[in-house]
Image (spheres, helix red, strand yellow):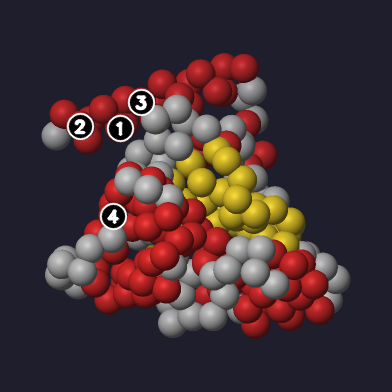
Amino acid sequence: MENLKRLFENNRKLVAEVTRDDPDFFKRRAGKQEPHFLFIGCADSRVPIEMLTGVAPGEMFVHRNVANQVLAADLNLLSVLQYAVDVLDVKHVIVCGHYGCGGVKAAMSDEPAGLVDHWLAGIRELRKRHASEMEAVGAEEAQFNRLVELNILRQVYHLSRNPIIQQAWSRGRRPLLHGMVYHLDDGLLTDLVLEVDGPERVRHFFERGHLPIAG
């Protein structure tokens, strides 16, 4: 109960601080939301999305799941994506993973992990497909980090092949797709791929081998 009580106490303190300087802060944001970003991230509690990006309430539409997956059969993700793109008209869709990801770590092994194995199947397949590249980077920690990166890139590619995104592009080159990775140890974001805005850009980054993860 102490931890739960702390949530309410922190909430009251934050609201008091914000409204002291700007009494109408929350009232202005209670109306129509007009976010610039859709953020697809990992459910890991160590990744504080709003804090690490510095956005204000209303700027970012958020979807989170284990290991920041973009799966064609995930109706939750697809519903969020369609609403963000077709209704909210977001300008950017970001896939953000993080080093030290527990889901990717579990996918490094073929040992059964329970129900989550179904969710991690694509990452395990990705690891096997890039086995030679993984071995070339060296020690296990480096391989782990590279699989985190490859997983992010794969999800950006999945987005680029999604009909919701492709139809939006056919109407005018938005949204832009981006892949980023978060460093738990220093709080910094690093870009992996930026401004994928149509089929030509997809071919440049993915299908021509610059980032060999398509398929």
Q: Earlier in the sequence, mark 4 or mark 1?
A: 1
Q: Earlier in the sequence, mark 4 or mark 3?
A: 3
Where residue 82 appears, as percent x and y from the top left, is: 61, 73
Tell me: 64 left or right of 58: left
The quadrant of the picture occupied by the N terminus is top left
Structural distance between the alpha carbons of marks 2 and 1: 7 Å
Where residue 25 appears, as percent x and y from the top left, is: 62, 31
Structural distance between the alpha carbons of marks 2 and 4: 29 Å
Callout 4 secondary element: helix
Q: Which residue is mark 2?
A: 3
Q: Which residue is mark 3?
A: 10
Q: Earlier in the sequence, mark 3 or mark 2?
A: 2
Q: Which residue is mark 1?
A: 7
In this view, the residue in front, 71 or 16, is 71
The quadrant of the picture occupied by the C terminus is bottom right
Of circles 2 and 4, the one toward us is 4
Mark 1 burial class by Cα count in 10 Å: few <14, some 14-19, many 20+: few
